[in-house]
Image (cartoon, rainbow, N blue to C red):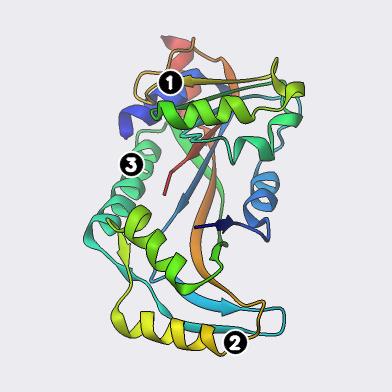
């Protein structure tokens, strides 16, 4: 079964219409396999993406392009207990999964 | 969820931005789409669990606004298409991935199969998911509270 998601790239267009990612420190909550992450991470200073699904995070880490290895980090964490200090990020994305 | 929003507020800088991006149930249309034409074949069913999830998310954001944590700056709906090669693939996806919050009735399944069978060779089946994107900013009231803590 092959599914195509957002072939018209509406999500990417709206994400960039609503936020400027240039040189921002970004936290993404609910990153899954990183589908959304790859749409903006190249512009950021650093991106931390979290999820509760370890298998999805493994896929995201494997898929991470080499040029983003020092800029995009995936980790298993709960949104109710974020493992980060106060005022660490300029921008957060709450990506509700479905 | 409100606790998560409090955590997000904590890790954001003063004046930081929160982008809330999520699907919202609204009897998503099912379409058979080819390069030549797009035909709607029916609508998805919205199940109580999915509607309750939407309501809980709306309520959490509303609570965060009431508490003075975030101020809403911009909001829009936009379409997000999921597409498959055939109606059977759509049905399989719904049965395995979406069955808790949305579904298809038999009439719509039949209409989708029938329209797809007579459509152009490049026709795909797709669901037009209604997405909501909102930009929230850490509110001024929150900045005052943080500076006092």
C-alpha separation, residue under disc 1 versus residue under disc 2: 45 Å
Using the image as rendered, state which of residue B106 and residue B9 is in the foreground.
B106
Q: Give the residue at x 53% y 48%.
A: B134
**Label number found at residue B60:** 3
In which chain is the residue bearing label 2? B
- Characterize the local packing of mark 3: few (<14), some (14-19) or many (20 or more) Cα atoms within 10 angstroms: some
The mark lying in front, picked from 1 and 2, is 2
Q: For mark 2, give the secondary structure.
A: loop
Element assignment for label 1: strand
Say which residue appears at 46% left-offset and 25% top-offset: B9
Mark 2 and mark 3, same subunit?
A: yes
Q: Is residue A59 visible?
A: yes
Q: Is residue A39 left or right of residue B100?
A: right
Query: Who's the residue at 28% across and 59% down the image?
Result: B51
**In the displayed structure, does residue A16 sit left or right of residue A85?**
right
Q: Position of residue B31 (x, y in %)?
A: 52, 77
- Secondary structure of the residue carrying tag 3 is helix
User: Mark 3 belongs to which subunit?
Assistant: B
Task: Compute the Cα span from label 2 to label 3.
Answer: 44 Å
For residue B1, which quarter of the picture? top left
Q: Residues within 10 Å of mark 1 (few under 14, many from 20)?
A: some
Q: Is B66 on the left-hand or right-hand side of B36?
A: left
* Sequence order check, earlier mark of 2 and 3: 3
Instruction: Provide the residue designation for mark 2.
Output: B119
Given contact means CB atoms under 8 Å apart, are the residues at marks 1 and 2 in contact?
no
Local packing at callout 2 (Cα closer than 10 Å; few below 14, some 14-19, many 20+) is: some
Residue A26 x, y percent position in the rendering: 61, 26
């Amino acid at each position: 079964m092959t599914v195509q998601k957002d072939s018209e790239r509406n999500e990417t267009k709206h994400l960039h219409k609503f936020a400027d990612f240039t040189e921002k420190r970004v936290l993404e909550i609910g990153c899954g396999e990183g589908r959304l992450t790859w749409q903006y991470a190249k512009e950021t200073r650093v991106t931390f993406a979290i999820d509760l699904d370890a298998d999805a995070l493994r896929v995201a880490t494997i898929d991470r392009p080499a040029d983003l290895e020092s800029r995009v980090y995936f980790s298993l964490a709960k949104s109710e207990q974020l493992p980060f200090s106060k005022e660490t990020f300029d921008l957060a994305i709450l990506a509700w999964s479905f | 969820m409100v606790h998560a929003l409090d955590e997000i507020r904590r890790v954001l800088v003063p004046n930081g931005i929160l982008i809330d991006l999520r699907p919202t149930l609204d009897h998503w249309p099912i379409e058979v789409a080819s390069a030549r034409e797009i035909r709607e074949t029916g609508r998805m069913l919205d199940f109580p669990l999915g509607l309750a999830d939407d309501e809980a998310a709306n309520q959490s954001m509303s609570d965060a606004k009431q508490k003075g944590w975030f101020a809403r700056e911009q909001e829009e709906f936009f379409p997000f298409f999921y597409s498959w090669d055939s109606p059977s693939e759509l049905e399989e996806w719904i049965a395995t991935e979406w069955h808790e919050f949305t579904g298809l009735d038999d009439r719509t399944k039949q209409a989708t199969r029938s329209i797809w069978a007579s459509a152009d060779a490049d026709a795909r089946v797709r669901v037009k998911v209604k997405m909501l994107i909102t930009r929230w900013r850490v509110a001024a009231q929150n900045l005052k509270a943080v500076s006092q803590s």
